[in-house]
Image (cartoon, grey):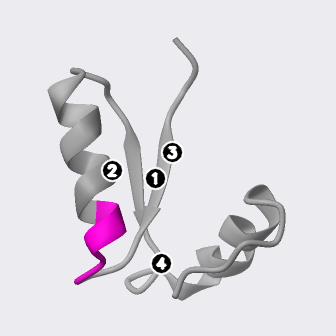
Amino acid sequence: MPRVVLYTKRLCPYCDRAKHLLRSKEVEWEEIDIEADPDRHDEMVERSGGRRAK
């Protein structure tokens, strides 16, 4: 299975639902909190094809 990387923010309902789905499917993932590590925000935007967290 491919490596799953999840960029998250606190109080993000989409992040919470994604984590819930991954847990239910027993998929392991790497979580990157872009509020705790803001330098990773640009990396997230680049990897997502320009999409931004709201």
Rendering coords of residue 52 (x, y %): 66, 79
Percent coordinates x, y for residue 24 in the rendering: 16, 28
Marks 2 and 3, the one that precedes in the sequence: 3
Residue 21: x and y, percent? 25, 38
Residue type, label 3:
Val
**Distance between the alpha carbons at the discs numbered 1 and 2:** 8 Å
Whether the magenta-drawn stretch holds residue 14 is answered as yes
The reply to whether discs 2 and 3 touch (Cβ–Cβ < 8 Å) is no
Q: Could you say whether the residue bearing mark 4 is in a helix, strand or loop? A: loop
Identify the element where label 1 is drawn.
strand
Residues at marks 2 and 3, CA–CA distance in whole angstroms:
11 Å
Which disc, if any, is residue 15?
A: none
Give the CA distance from mark 3 to mark 1.
4 Å
Mark 3 → mark 4, Cα distance in angstroms: 12 Å
Specify the label residue 5 is tagged with: 3
Is-magenta flag for residue 24? no
Please provide percent x and percent y for residue 50. 82, 72
Going from the N terminus, do you reach mark 4 or mark 1 first? 1
Do the residues bearing badges 1 and 2 touch, measured as CB atoms within 8 Å? yes
Which amino acid type corresponds to the residue marked 1 in the rendered image? Leu
Our reading of the magenta stretch's main secondary structure is helix
Residue underneath mark 2: 18
N-term-proximal mark, 4 vs 2: 2
The residue wearing badge 1 is: 6
Which range of residues does the magenta coloring cover? 11-15
Callouts 4 and 1 close, C-beta under 8 Å: no
Foreground of the two, 37 or 47: 47
